[in-house]
Image: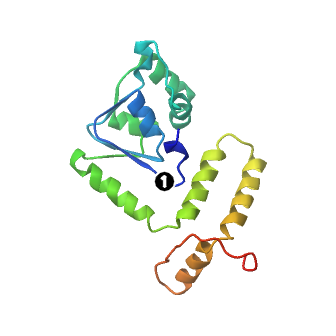
Amino acid sequence: MQLGNMQKPTIAAVNGPAIGGGLDLAMACDFQIASEKATFSERYNMLANNPDIGGSYRLARLVGVAKAKELTFFADIIDAEEALRIGLVNKVVPHDELMDVVGDMAARLTKYSPIALACRKFLIDRNQDCDYLTAIEREMLVARYLHRTTDPYEGIAAFREKREPKYVSKLLGHEQG
């Protein structure tokens, strides 16, 4: 699914029922922020059907295999607080504040290097199911790539000069990297 593979961080704002495909869509995002009125369920079992956009893959990774089986097999509807408790959502906020909270999160993300965020997202997503040495090798490869861009140098310069960085995420010439 394209949403889950985007390089930029994604945020799901759930303000009502996230049932079946709606829950799968929310889980494809990097962050799930729920209003206190949100509800969640994998109701496919009631229709003799299955998720088809990665829901079973993501659900087990977010809440654990046993809880994923419980939610999937029994098709129960859970409220936002239970979703937070089991790790299905990152945060629960008052219904009328949902979009402000999501907007604030998005604004915070724009302050960071887009290429560095993409690298971190890649590593977290790809290193879930590999061994430690593979994860370290990937981190070293990604670090080498990142340091061939302008952003780490801009970040260091901004820190030294006590100013906000201005990231442009451009590749450096071979002589500079």
Determine whether the residue tagged by mark 1 lies in a helix, strand or loop.
loop
Q: Which residue is mark 1?
A: 9
Residue 63 in picture, x, y percent from top left: 50, 34
Q: Residue at x 66, y 66 (%)?
A: 146
Instruction: Work out whether residue 128 or residue 114 is closer to the camera in this orientation and state it.
Output: 114
Most extreme residue toward the left is 96
Q: Residue at x 41, y 26 (%)?
A: 20
> Can see residue 88?
no
Q: Is residue 23 left or right of residue 115?
A: left
Q: Residue at x 57, y 78 (%)?
A: 154
Q: Is residue 44 left or right of residue 170?
A: left
Residue 17 in picture, x, y percent from top left: 31, 32
Q: Quadrant of residue 32?
A: top left
Q: Is residue 83 left or right of residue 153?
A: left
Instruction: Work out whether residue 142 or residue 127 is closer to the camera in this orientation and state it.
Output: 142
Q: Residue at x 72, y 79 (%)?
A: 176
Label 1 packing within 10 angstroms: few (<14), some (14-19), many (20+): some
Residue 54 in picture, x, y percent from top left: 53, 32
